Image: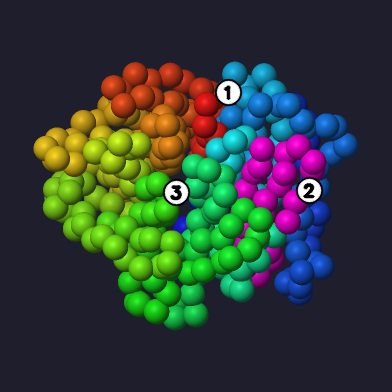
Amino acid sequence: MFNKPFASACIAISLFLIACNSNNSENDANKAVLDTISLSNKNFALAYQDGDKIVATSIDTMKQISFGGATDPAISPDGNKLAYTLSDSVGNRSVWIADLENKSQGKLQVNNNNYYGAVWSADAGKIAINVFNKNSVWKIGVIKADNSGYIMLDSASKINAFSPAWKNDHEIIAHDLENLYTFDLSGKIIGTEPIKALIGTVYNISSSNGFFYTKDGKKIIFNAANGPLIEGTHDEAEAVYLLDVASKKITQISPKGIHVSFLFVTADDRIFYSGAEKPYKQSKIYVADLSGNIKTVVDKGTYPTAALK
């Protein structure tokens, strides 16, 4: 349900992936191995998917590192670490963290065989992840960046929670296709907003669509389907929208004719998304502000995340 496609581009410094067998033991786990070139003072600002590789780059794309075999790139807000998802031969998924300066890496200690899609808090101290729990329900897990203090939010209920995002350093939002939930870090649901009451009925939401509050808490940025069918498919084109919570006014941020495959919003309100024009075979990465001013960042890539300025 949450598997993602890939896109492709050129690399400056390579990292390599050690293959693993299917025993799924800690010693046999996949591991990204950094090369011997020092990565300090590289000012990494953006991470994205590039074919079967992940790329971390400066915002001007002049400095890059990459490695293959991983998905779900998530650069930390300070630009020093990169989280990513590894999958083994039997379909288990786990999240790993690479330190871009000292070249160390480690697996997040979560007692689960299916967790993925790291999302950093703005202070880079905590990480939210998607977790498939023992009751076959999708939940949100939270763990400290030092790999301690893991908890699963709202662990006992049968409510699904998809696409986590940090509302602030102490609250996380996620949805179940019908409601947008706010969780505190003790795991309690402290707010519930019906999605239809927020954005109306003309937008179609999938489990991979995200919702992001702006820094002032007065607006929500989201992506959703509300357009013509994508040629050759039965799927509607998706776009990025800005919702004014008080007035319920919705403004489209991404241009018409662009199908948006992924959305990420930084804590300083910069809107990054990957999108493709007809014939929808190659995605570019764009950045926009809340006024809708847009710039192309990468000519070929998907699933961007960005550090803070």
Magenta segment, which residues? 80-106
Q: Locate residue 259: give its quadrant.
A: top left
* Residue type, label 3: Asp
Query: x%, y% of residue 210?
Result: 36, 48
Q: Does the magenta stretch include residue 234?
A: no
Residue 115 seen from this side = yes
Disc sitting over residue 169 in the figure = 3
Q: Counting residues from the N terminus, which is met first, the one under dot 3 or under dot 1?
A: 1
Query: x%, y% of residue 181?
Result: 30, 59
Q: Residue at x 79, y 58 (%)?
A: 19
Helix, strand or loop at disc 2?
Answer: loop
Q: Residue beneath label 1, please?
A: 59
Q: How far apart are marks 3 and 1 (CA)?
A: 25 Å
* Residue type, label 1: Ile
Q: Counting residues from the N terminus, which is met first, the one under dot 2 or under dot 1?
A: 1
Q: Residue beneath label 2, please?
A: 104
Whether residues under marks 2 and 3 lie with C-beta atoms below 8 angstroms apart, the answer is no
Q: Quadrant of the N terminus?
A: bottom left
Helix, strand or loop at disc 3?
Answer: loop
Q: How far apart are marks 2 and 3 (CA)?
A: 26 Å
Q: In the image, is residue 242 above or below residue 98?
A: above
Query: x%, y% of residue 141?
Result: 50, 64
Q: Is residue 120 left or right of residue 234?
A: right
Query: x%, y% of residue 110?
Result: 61, 68
Helix, strand or loop at disc 1?
Answer: loop
Q: In the image, is residue 208 above or below residue 306?
A: below
- The chosen color scheme is rainbow
